[in-house]
Amino acid sequence: MTSDARLPVLVGCGQITVRDDDKRFGTEPALLMAESLRLAAEDAGNPKLLEAADTIAVPKGIWPYADPGRIVSQEVGAPTAKTILSPIGGNYCQTLVSDAASAIQAGERDIVLFTAAETQRSQRKARNSGKDISYTPSSAPPDIPFPDSAPEMSHPREAAIGLFAPTTWYALFEIGLRYKRGEKPDEHIKRVSELWERFAAVAADNPYAMIRDHPSAAEIRTPSPTNRMISFPYTKLMTANINVDQTASAIVCSVETARRMGVPEDRWVYIHSGADAHDHTIVSHRESVCGSPAMRIAGNRALELANITKDDIDHIDVYSCFPCAVQILASELDIPETRRLTVTGGLTFFGGPLNSYVAHGITSMMDTVRADPGSKGLVTANGGFTTKHAFGVYSTEPPADGFKYENVQEEVDKTPRRVFEPDHVGDMDVEAYTVVYGREGFDRGIVSGITAEGSRSYAVTTDTDLMTALTEEEFCGRTAQRAADGTVKF
């Protein structure tokens, strides 16, 4: 049984959303990380937590630092702290917190500063105006290696036909979900936009959210000059909003350290459990384009390790890069889509700062369970194309038998796997499709099909009439013919 003194606990959190009129607009990510850490120390009631830290953990972002943690360590007065940099992936925020909790409980670390930031909005504005973007030099590697659980997430033959961007993959998954649920296109888009309207309602009440004007479901699903189509059936207001400058941080330590540093217990949030796994990394190998065995197995395992069921979850923040990611998670864990599924407002409306969004999910969950003592909160994290998954359970009440963590990859690897036949010629049953848009209209249609042998293949079209039909009719369940040149006919 774990000694109470070594229980890992989150003691402080801070987050910042920098708007265009903020004097901090244009501040580089590492300096924003340091600022949100100062807020986290202030939240914990003791700024000395920063200088006493032994570790600084950062998820990789879209910036050139080789070791941002080293820059942050100098800024916050912890120059001897060891640094960790995770690979790219929206899952790694939760994975890093689970890693910190495991190490603290084992006595290997004592105070871990977790921090993340992205500044795509100010960087984009600078580039568009021809200004140079400056970053503090950072070329030495971090102190502690952190391997990538799934480094290869795209097959070259998928990318060659346009299946490489999340906006395309997730739109394809969405159509597969529509067919699986037996919905007509108009029924489906109405339900999905209403789901997203509920996320927008949460963002409207969140002072850190980027979009707070609470668009209606009709506004979300209706294309307009400010809400263009991205990949059918998604408009811009159904996609992750990476055009943000945001940072979030949390301080993790042992209970004995929290007591020694004088952190009031009403600031403490215990980490009850964590679980990780990834689906088959190449999408074409998955049995279904609209399911996730890793979500199901790892999510349920996190709940089991915390000795709770889905019905015991009081608050949840589901990773919400696109509507299908939310629906797949809800389906795999048997959680009603009609319940409140976010504590931030989601990646469209709160903001989706690439790999660091879940830092905001975790810090927001800290505030949420603090305001509801004894409640249980679940944070879900997703990287890639519903590829890499991490889960964490949080509460102001301590776990009965310490923090528990498990990587369930071995079990996920046993789930069914399809053969990818990129050169298939002939009939295939359509399981999903999408139409990708450019700025001026249709770009291409992509159809995913299953052959008579159970393999998966894709075919494309640039025919305007067919692409129009794909956006108006149901093509799933039909038989398509893939030609030798990779084009599709019906």
Image (cartoon, grey):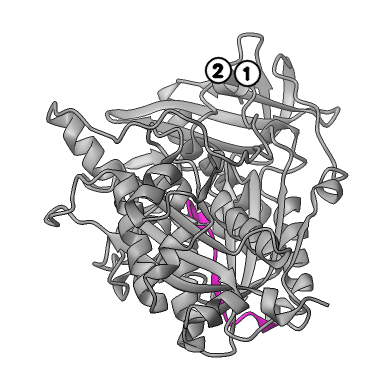
Residue 279 location, x and y as percent? Answer: 72, 44
Q: Quadrant of residue 96?
A: bottom right
The answer to whether residue 219 is left or right of residue 380 is: left
The residue where tag 2 is placed is: 160
Q: Quadrant of the N terminus?
A: bottom right
Q: Residues within 10 Å of mark 1 (few under 14, many from 20)?
A: some
Question: As displayed, is residue 215 above or below residue 11?
Answer: above
Q: Quadrant of residue 248?
A: bottom left
Q: Is residue 317 shown in magenta? A: yes
Residue 164 location, x and y as percent? Answer: 53, 29
Q: Which residues are magenta?
A: 312-323
In terms of depth relative to the viewer, which is nearer, 324 or 184? 324
In terms of depth relative to the viewer, which is nearer, 129 or 249? 249
The residue where tag 1 is placed is: 157
Q: Where residue 258 is drawn, which disc sits there?
A: none
Mark 1: which secondary structure?
helix
Q: Is residue 401 shown in magenta? A: no
Q: In percent of the image, x 61 and y 18: which residue is there?
A: 156
Q: In percent of the image, x 26 and y 67: which residue is there?
A: 212
Residue 243 location, x and y as percent? Answer: 30, 46
Question: As displayed, is residue 234 above or below residue 215?
Answer: above
In the rendered structure, are the residues bearing label 2 and label 1 in contact, judged by CB atoms less than 8 Å apart?
yes
Q: What is the three-letter code of the residue carrying label 2?
A: Ala
The answer to whether residue 74 is left or right of residue 152 is: left
The answer to whether residue 368 shows anywhere in this view is yes
Q: In percent of the image, x 48 and y 66: which residue is there?
A: 251
